[in-house]
Amino acid sequence: MDFATSEHGGDDRTPGPGPERGTGPVPVALTGARFHGDPAALYRELRREHGEVVPVLLDGDVPAWLVLGYRELHQVTSDPELFSRDSGLWNQWPNIPADWPLLPVISREQPSILGSVGERHRRRAALLGEALEAVDAFTLRRHAERFADELLDAVCGAGTADLVAQYAALLPVRVLAYLFGFPEEQGPDLVAALTDILDGQGRARAAEARLTAAMTRLVAERRERPADDVVSRLLANASAQGFSVEEVTHDVMVMLAAGHQPTTDWIGNSLRLMLTDERFAASLFGGRSSVAEAMNEVLWEDAPIQNAAGRWLSRDTRLGGRALRAGDLVLLGLQGANSDPRVRTHGSALTGGNNAHFSFGHGEHRCPFPAREIAEVIARTGIEVVLDRLPDLDLAVPEETLVRRPSPWLRGLVELPVRFSPSPAVGGR
């Protein structure tokens, strides 16, 4: 991929020699402390230097384009024909080694819904939406409260806790596992597997194998003995639509992984905001009116999914003044688009509970609406139960010492140490 050589500011930029030749704007490595320290400042810097479409380098110096502009990202996500989800179009495949660390995210053959395109994708997404939409909201909240109480029972007598490792990182997957039909005793192992996969270290492959085996067993059981759960509903409709058992298995794995970590970070980032911003102090002392506002502000300012891959150009085009070539990889800069000054010039974009952020994506490949509702119920319930059970909650360390996960993709806290008055366990409710 060649990157533009002219300075930002005009629409006459044309492809020039690549960065390896020492000319043109230097691509930005999509790694490093800047992405998890102060990404807002980084996105402002990238806009000044490169504009709304930024040349970046992934692991192994693999080139791509990062779209930061709100309008440009809307264009990308609204045109699945030009900006395709078909990774087979990628012009960099000859340069990708077999052990490339991003292959779990960007693979040539993706058996899940992430790799489907066109009408087949639309039918597949509809099946997932129908299976999730049947989840009863009252039942969902009741079980989210029950699991939240169980987790807090384990720490409430100590007077201190890490609300990431001991709470937020455990709650979403426990609820989702119940909705999908897993036995409750499998919840802890699913949490451990997803944690190891996210870490991407030596245990990741073994954890992925454990998760696949558990999901395969569950799907096989539900084929034999259907129940009132997401997997059973999905299986009942998938065969009639021409989708295989293997496709269902991979889709449920994607739903579990995609639903767990972003919801975990939504809880953690929202609690951090409420503990450090005096605008939300009332909520910490028995009020609830600000919980939804804090959660919405996080989606605008501190989104759990900062950047996402990806789209591939089906033909040459121009975007944000850049000349992109067929087969180029385009990354979705969700947080960058949310902070685009062109849509934030007339006061805060948060006014009136504005939900026009990109945190759930946009277009036909966005997060399905029922999945968004489930994530919101889990996150809001998790936050409210904390505030109910630990009413004098306070941050146990200076705010500036809180550490973020070192990732340009997902933004969340490594830990959230808090202190509170010890209280007795409630034993579920």
Image (cartoon, grey):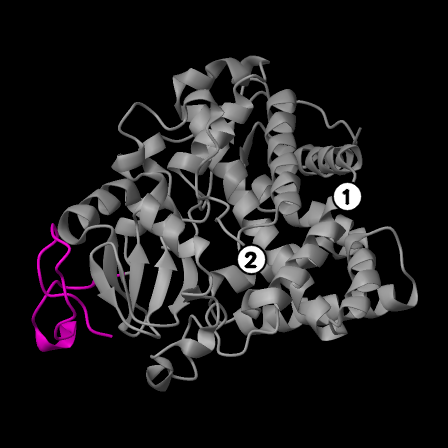
Query: Is the magenta region chiefly helix, strand or loop?
Result: loop
Where is residue 352 shown, x and y percent of the image? 46, 21
Residue 82: in magenta span? no
The alpha-carbon separation of the residues under discs 1 and 2 comes to: 25 Å
Left/right of residue 173 with respect to residue 266 in the rendered view:
right
Determine which quarter of the picture holds residue 31.
Answer: bottom left
**Badge 2 local density, few (<14 within 10 Å), some, or many (20+)?**
some
Image quadrant occupied by the C terminus? top right
Residue 195 bears which disc, if any?
2
Amino acid at dot 2 = Thr
As displayed, is residue 90 above or below residue 375? below
Left/right of residue 295 with respect to residue 231 in the rendered view:
left
Q: Helix or strand or loop: what does disc 1 sit on?
A: loop
- Between residue 280 and residue 313, name the one nearer to us: 313
Image quadrant occupied by the N terminus? bottom left
Residue 12: in magenta span? yes
Q: Residue furthest bottom?
A: 94
Q: Helix or strand or loop: what does disc 2 sit on?
A: helix
Left/right of residue 299 with respect to residue 16 in the rendered view:
right
Q: Which residues are magenta?
A: 1-29
Left/right of residue 269 with respect to residue 261 in the rendered view:
left
Label 1 sits on residue: 135
Residue at the image point whose x is 49% and y is 78% from the top? 108
